[in-house]
């Protein structure tokens, strides 16, 4: 395929073959996927989906994924037979980032670093299996699937402000727990309030740079401030929901006369029984993920309160693996779209009606974590935002986990991190090696492209002080 450089931050793949729209890749020459990665082929494949509008987009952290590239954004016109594809959301439904801030400075952490990290390590269940901050009865799980973070808040875990500073007010309103299988429920029962494994983490950070003091102040951030960032999702429950509905859609595509170039793009029309069932189950998984990060954040705040006498306040909580029904103007007409964001973050502009009053003038906070041991960013949505007000979600892998394990010495990595002043609490050597900084793109370069392409703008840069890894 021919990749045309339109600007230093935007590349285009013209329509060819079965493509219904062009491909648009936000990147620099340095960040484009290497030959053989397959991510650009996936951009082309997504462009063939029925009902897709505008373009098949890829963010600067893009890399190969399941069906869609990770960092992929695509919107389909619901009223024109547009489809929904679980591959455009991913297996870790509503995986996202939660940022909390304390009225403490970096020096406060240094005085109690070991006690803080030991406490956070004990309070943060992680790994592939069971283990949770909050063991729920079955009726409690049902309420979480319906109510998201509202359920723990109503039971004294957190405050109403935690809901105001969470995407969708802490819960997606169109959740349908009845669409969640018994197997998915079983997997979710023992995991609410847990990190999981892979690239999920809890990290203590300090605000190292502030680019806009006014907006940073509204977000609740200031220079040298201590923060906690949590990255995780819907755990086994979300994975099972994706598995269940991929199978169902694969079996029903022929009934709708649908053919896709890759079975991993299994889909059905949004306005079909299978499409509605998936979106209802996906929203229930998103509510579980919001409650999961919420409960972990409360537990982290309890640790900080016990060790330092100061707790944590929520800055924002945002997901980066979702499909949402949204209204956007396309070709001069307002349309109802199903916007898939897989490894991509919504970045609503100032004045958007979905923003809470306290954030309406600033634009939506955007949280972009780096790889382990590198910086993370707080950004904000902008009026010029392209790709249905979307931006990247992280640094983006350059090596698979298997490749990283073969090439990284985990013990040396731990020594290097600690030499840089980062206190590490990892559950396994393999887990550390899989998430080594060298397995990822340079997050500074990724954010520079996102800002240069007009997708969002930088507000603050955070650096790691301590990390708890799954």
Image: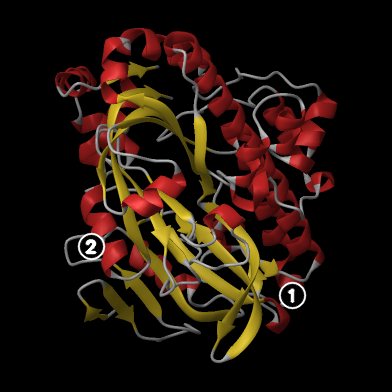
Residue, far bottom: 332
Q: 98 or 407, which is in the foreground?
A: 98
The spot of residue 6 in percent (x, y) is 25, 82
Could you tell whether 119 is left or right of 284 in the image?
left
Other-residue count near label 1 (Cα within 10 Å), few / some / many at <14 / 14–19 / ≥20: few
Could you tell whether 156 is left or right of 467 in the image?
right
What colour-coding does the image apply?
A: secondary structure
Work out which quarter of the rendered image holds the N terminus and state it. bottom left
Work out which quarter of the rendered image holds the C terminus and state it. top left
Is the residue 25 above or below the residue 115 in the image?
below
The spot of residue 455 in percent (x, y) is 37, 67
* Secondary structure beneath label 1: helix
* Secondary structure beneath label 2: loop
What's the residue at 38%, 40% (across, down)?
Answer: 221
Is the residue 277 above or below the residue 147 in the image?
below
Examine the image and state in which quarter residue 153 appears: top right
Is the residue 323 above or below the residue 285 in the image?
below
Could you tell whether 303 is left or right of 279 in the image?
left
What's the residue at 23%, 62% (across, down)?
Answer: 35
Total numbered badges shown on the rendered structure: 2
Image mark for residue 35:
2
Is the residue 13 above or below the residue 194 in the image?
below
| Whole-number angstrom distance, CA of label 1 to CA of label 2 | 35 Å
Label whose residue precedes the other's in the sequence (1 or 2): 2
What's the residue at 20%, 18% (across, down)?
Answer: 418
The residue tagged 1 is 256
């Amino acid at each position: 395929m021919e990749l045309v450089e339109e600007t230093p931050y935007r590349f285009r793949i013209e329509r060819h073959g079965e493509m219904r729209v062009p491909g648009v890749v936000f990147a620099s020459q340095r960040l484009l996927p290497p030959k053989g990665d397959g991510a650009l082929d996936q951009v082309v494949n997504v462009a063939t989906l029925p009902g897709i509008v505008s373009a098949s987009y890829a963010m600067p952290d893009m890399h190969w994924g399941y069906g869609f590239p990770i960092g992929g954004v695509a919107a389909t016109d619901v009223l024109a037979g547009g489809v929904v594809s679980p591959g455009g959301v991913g297996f870790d439904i509503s995986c996202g980032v939660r940022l909390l801030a304390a009225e403490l400075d970096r020096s406060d952490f240094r005085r109690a670093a070991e006690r803080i990290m030991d406490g956070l390590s004990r309070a943060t269940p992680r790994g592939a299996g069971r283990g949770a901050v909050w063991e729920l009865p079955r009726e409690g799980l049902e309420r979480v699937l319906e109510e998201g973070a509202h359920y723990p808040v109503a039971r004294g875990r957190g405050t109403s402000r935690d809901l105001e500073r969470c995407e969708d007010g802490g819960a997606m309103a169109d959740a349908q727990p009845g669409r969640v299988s018994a197997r998915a429920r079983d997997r979710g029962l023992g995991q609410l309030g847990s990190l999981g494994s892979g690239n999920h983490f809890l990290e203590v950070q300090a605000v190292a740079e502030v680019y806009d003091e006014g907006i940073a102040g509204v977000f609740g951030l200031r220079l040298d401030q201590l923060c906690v960032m949590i990255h995780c999702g819907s755990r086994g429950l979300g994975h099972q929901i994706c598995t269940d509905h991929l199978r169902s859609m694969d079996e029903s595509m022929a009934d709708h006369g649908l053919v896709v170039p890759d079975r991993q793009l299994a889909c059905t029309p949004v306005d079909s029984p299978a499409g509605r069932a998936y979106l209802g189950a996906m929203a229930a998984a998103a509510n579980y993920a919001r409650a999961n990060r919420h409960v972990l954040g409360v537990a982290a705040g309890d640790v900080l309160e016990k060790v330092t006498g100061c707790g944590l306040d929520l800055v924002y909580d945002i997901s980066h693996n979702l499909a949402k029904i949204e209204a956007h103007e396309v070709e001069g007409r307002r349309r109802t779209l199903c916007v898939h964001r897989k490894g991509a973050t919504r970045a609503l502009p100032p004045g958007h009606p979905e923003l809470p009053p306290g954030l309406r003038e600033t634009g939506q906070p955007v949280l972009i974590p780096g790889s382990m041991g590198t910086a993370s960013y707080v950004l904000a949505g902008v009026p010029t935002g392209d790709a249905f007000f979307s931006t990247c979600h992280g640094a983006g892998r350059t090596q698979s986990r298997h490749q990283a394990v073969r090439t990284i010495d985990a013990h040396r990595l731990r020594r290097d991190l600690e030499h840089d002043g980062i206190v590490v609490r990892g559950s396994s050597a393999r887990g550390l090696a899989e998430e080594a900084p060298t397995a990822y793109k340079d997050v500074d370069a990724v954010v520079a492209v996102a800002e240069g392409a007009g997708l969002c703008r930088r507000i603050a840069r955070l650096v790691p002080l301590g990390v708890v890894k799954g």
